[in-house]
């Protein structure tokens, strides 16, 4: 549940930001957009979110300029992070770090690396091998030592997300044509 709309009128940047991304489904949608999910059906499959809730959250994120909605070459709709949405990476990463520290006793669920040299990134996004701050499109995410395959579903979207990949790289999930069209 989001904060009452009266918070948007207050002089508090945190309250205003929470009006946009403070609901749990919203941050999970943003996280999956970083992981390359772009299609409505893929968000629904990955998150197991009620379709009406997903519709509302995507609409809100587009209205707020966090996502852009456009048609792909095949006539389907895709959602991509805007520059404003990409600015949320440090927030998403910080929450992932916090969750790993307090709720993943076996280690990080997903490791973040510099795709160029494979070095692990620290909490500030600096490569531990070359020392550079790594731009988001050059970050590779992969299973970490705390990843448990038993906790993951086996579907094309989950399989793609669980394969080492760069952030923002679109997932090309295998699509099954509707009955009678294939």
Image (cartoon, rainbow, N blue to C red):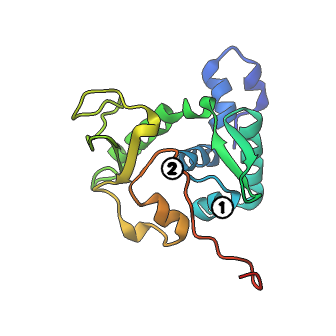
Q: Are marks 1 and 2 in contact (CB under 8 Å)?
A: no
* Residue placed under numbered mark 1 in the picture: 44
Q: In the rendered view, does 168 fall on the left or right side of 141? A: right
Disc number for residue 35: 2
Expressed as whole percent of the image width and height from the top left, the position of residue 82 reads 64, 34
Judge by depth and name the residue closer to the eye, 33 or 15. 33
Q: Quadrant of residue 43?
A: bottom right
Q: Quadrant of residue 123?
A: top left
Which residue is rendered at x = 78% and y = 30% of the image?
A: 5
Is 117 situated above or below 105? above
Expressed as whole percent of the image width and height from the top left, the position of residue 142 reads 36, 53
Judge by depth and name the residue closer to the eye, 140 or 10. 140
The answer to whether residue 109 is visible is no
Which residue is rendered at x = 60% and y = 30% of the image?
A: 83
Which one is earlier in the sequence, the residue at label 1 or at label 2? 2
Judge by depth and name the residue closer to the eye, 34 or 147. 34
Which residue is rendered at x = 43% and y = 43% of the image?
A: 96
Label 2, secondary structure: give it: loop
Q: Is label 1 or label 2 in front?
A: 2
* Extreme residue toward the left, this view: 129
Q: In the rendered view, does 89 fall on the left or right side of 20? A: left
Expressed as whole percent of the image width and height from the top left, the position of residue 91 reads 49, 33
Q: Residues within 10 Å of mark 1 (few under 14, many from 20)?
A: some
């Amino acid at each position: 549940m989001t904060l009452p709309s009266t918070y948007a009128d207050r002089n508090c940047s945190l309250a205003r930001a929470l009006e946009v991304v403070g609901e749990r489904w919203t941050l999970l949608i943003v996280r999956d957009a970083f992981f390359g999910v772009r299609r409505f059906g893929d968000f629904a499959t990955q998150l197991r979110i009620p379709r009406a809730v997903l519709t509302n959250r995507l609409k809100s994120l587009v209205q707020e300029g966090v996502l852009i909605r456009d048609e792909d070459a095949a006539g389907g709709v895709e959602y991509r992070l805007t520059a404003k949405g990409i600015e949320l990476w440090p927030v998403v990463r910080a929450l992932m770090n916090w969750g790993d520290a307090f709720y993943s006793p076996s280690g990080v669920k997903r490791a973040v690396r510099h795709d160029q040299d494979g070095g692990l990134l620290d909490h500030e996004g600096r490569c531990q091998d070359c020392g550079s701050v790594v731009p988001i499109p050059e970050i590779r995410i992969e299973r970490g030592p705390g990843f448990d395959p038993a906790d993951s579903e086996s579907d094309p979207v989950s399989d793609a997300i669980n394969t080492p990949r760069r952030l923002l790289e679109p997932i090309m999930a295998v699509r099954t044509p509707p009955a009678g069209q294939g």
